[in-house]
């Protein structure tokens, strides 16, 4: 009996064991399909894992190729590199530390003082040793002769007047924009407000391409000391009103955050980029009471206290003018070539501009010369408004008014014509990039004249491809023979094109 009972229990256990897999199998599937489904699932998981690994390896390879291309001696590969991209940031976020020699020097620490409250502001003004008395031409000569119906903002500077303006004397009278009744007029409330501004941070927005960016890291001392002035045209004021909140005070002043909006009515030029050069280069004319100014382009957010900037770039080295080196270019002819490639202005007019400079003795920049570079990065300009600094700004603006609005092409030429008598600080580009955060334009700028490829497209009166109130030096017969002038060869060394 005991044996039979044991066999009965064993039989039941065996039957249960037979039934167990049946319960675990998916309903509706045969015993042969179940192992195949397990194999398929395992294969799919492996495929996903392998695909993910291969995808990560591909991304890593592309990123490392980008890093290598930045330092390749082969021009094709080096042209691919754009060091302004976020590739190095991506690598760092992945925990991949790029060796220091391979990292682009985009930003670098600035040797700033630590505390704006402890900075000692120099008393008085820097004495003027060369030019002591500077005055400005205020009447348009052709208007006085009744050969023109309305004055031009830059006047009609003759070639002989231009030549004389580069000869330094203790007392000088030069063209410097703001010819009477030529436009760029400020409202009385703004004129009254800026009369009190000795320290100025200025910016500008023209043709509605940006909205004001609020500065950061500004000390309470600087907020009280500086006037933050945003110069705008009528189109930009309308655009700003539609996109951000404008506060109006009881005296008619318009504010966006810390910025006081200063409207320039009746834009004097056809080309918005030329209008933007007025506050950028001629701050001493717009705000004549200012002793110190920091200009920053409208698309940039200042991230360093302005008192620290003045101490670092002016007071420490006893300079009255500071500007950054261009990131890639040293020669104006190299910069001109890049402007043509990027369609920044009519190509034949850029060539004519450069031929005039070449005829007048402007050589290509070379290492070991008198200047660190002939091409600045002009989005930040730091100035004490001395007579010599103001004269340089006037002469620089006159070149922009006469020729192309690409002010980087004219800066080095004016330095050259002053024969080394204008002392300024040209600081490293990596420091320039540490002064601000860059914000994109609201839209891309474009004008008809930028797309001109040959001079015939500019022929004819009233052509929309031709400016009518600026660049007139390119249409006035030049006193020298430019036919034999050959522009120097340009090697494309810029990795950004």
Image: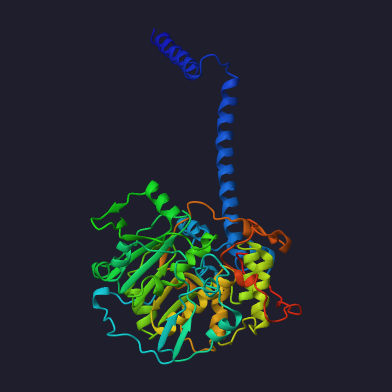
Picture layout, residue 227 above or below residue 299: below
Q: Quadrant of residue 459?
A: bottom right
- How is this picture coloured? rainbow
Q: Residue at x 44, y 55 (%)?
A: 210
* Quadrant position of residue 12: top left
Where is residue 251? Give x, y as percent. Answer: 25, 58
Q: Is residue 148 above or below residue 31?
A: below
Residue 484 locus on image (x, y percent): 76, 80
For the N terminus, give its image quadrant.
top left
Is 368 situated left or right of 114 in this image? right
Q: Does the rendering let one see residue 78?
A: no
Residue at image position (49%, 73%) is: 429
Q: Position of residue 190 (x, y in %)?
A: 32, 63
Q: Is 93 situated left or right of 222 in this image?
A: right
* Residue 93 to residue 318: above or below: above
Q: Which of 171 and 334 is in front in this view?
A: 171
Q: What is the residue that sits farthest to the top in this orientation?
A: 1
**In this rendering, does residue 14 appear at all?**
yes
Q: Furthest-right residue in view?
A: 484
Residue 95 location in percent, x, y? 46, 58
Query: Residue at 32% of width from left, 85% of height from top?
Result: 125
Residue 32: image quadrant is top right
In terms of depth relative to the viewer, which is nearer, 307 or 166? 166
Quarter of the image where the C terminus is located: bottom right
Foreground pick, 55 / 277:
277
**Count of numbered circles in the view:** 0
């Amino acid at each position: 009996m005991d044996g039979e009972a044991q066999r009965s229990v064993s039989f039941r256990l065996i039957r249960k064991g037979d039934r167990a897999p049946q319960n675990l199998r998916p309903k509706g599937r045969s015993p042969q399909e179940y192992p195949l489904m397990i194999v398929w699932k395992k294969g799919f998981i492996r495929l996903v894992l392998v695909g993910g690994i291969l995808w990560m390896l591909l991304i890593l390879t592309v990123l490392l190729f980008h890093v290598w291309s930045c330092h390749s001696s082969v021009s094709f590969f080096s042209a691919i590199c754009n060091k302004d991209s976020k590739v190095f940031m991506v690598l760092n976020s992945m925990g991949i530390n790029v060796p220091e020699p391979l990292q682009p020097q985009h930003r670098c620490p600035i040797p700033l003082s630590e505390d704006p409250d402890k900075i000692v502001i120099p008393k008085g003004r820097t004495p003027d040793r060369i030019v002591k008395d500077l005055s400005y031409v205020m009447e348009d000569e052709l208007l006085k002769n009744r050969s023109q119906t309305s004055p031009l903002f830059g006047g009609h500077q003759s070639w002989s007047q231009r030549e004389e303006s580069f000869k330094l004397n203790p007392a000088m009278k030069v063209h410097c924009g703001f010819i009477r009744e030529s436009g760029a007029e400020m409202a009385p409330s703004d004129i009254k407000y800026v009369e009190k501004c000795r320290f100025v941070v200025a910016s500008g927005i023209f043709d509605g391409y940006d909205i004001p960016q609020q500065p950061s890291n500004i000390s309470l001392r600087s907020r009280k000391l500086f006037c933050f002035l945003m110069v705008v045209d009528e189109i930009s004021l309308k655009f700003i009103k539609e996109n951000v909140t404008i506060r109006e005070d009881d005296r008619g002043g318009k504010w966006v955050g810390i910025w006081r909006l200063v409207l320039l009515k009746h834009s004097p030029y056809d080309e918005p980029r030329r209008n933007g050069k007025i506050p950028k280069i001629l701050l001493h004319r717009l705000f004549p009471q200012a002793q110190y100014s920091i200009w920053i382009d409208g698309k940039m957010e200042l991230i360093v206290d302005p008192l620290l900037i003045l101490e670092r770039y002016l007071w420490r080295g006893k300079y009255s003018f500071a500007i950054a080196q261009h990131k890639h270019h040293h020669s104006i002819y190299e910069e001109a070539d890049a402007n043509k490639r990027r369609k920044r202005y009519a190509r034949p007019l850029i060539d004519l501009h450069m031929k005039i400079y070449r005829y007048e003795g402007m050589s290509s920049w070379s290492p070991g010369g008198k200047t660190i570079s002939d091409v600045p990065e002009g989005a930040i300009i730091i100035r004490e408004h001395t007579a010599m600094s103001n004269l340089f700004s006037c002469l620089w603006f006159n070149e922009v008014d006469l020729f192309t609005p690409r002010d980087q092409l004219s800066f080095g030429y004016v330095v050259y014509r002053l024969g080394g008598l204008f002392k300024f600080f040209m600081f490293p580009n990596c420091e320039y990039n540490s002064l601000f955060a860059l914000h994109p334009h609201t839209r891309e700028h474009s004008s008809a004249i930028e797309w001109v490829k040959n001079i015939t497209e500019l022929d004819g009166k009233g052509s929309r491809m031709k400016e009518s109130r600026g660049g007139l030096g390119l249409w006035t017969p030049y006193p020298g023979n430019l036919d034999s002038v050959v522009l120097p060869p340009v090697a494309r060394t810029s990795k950004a094109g």
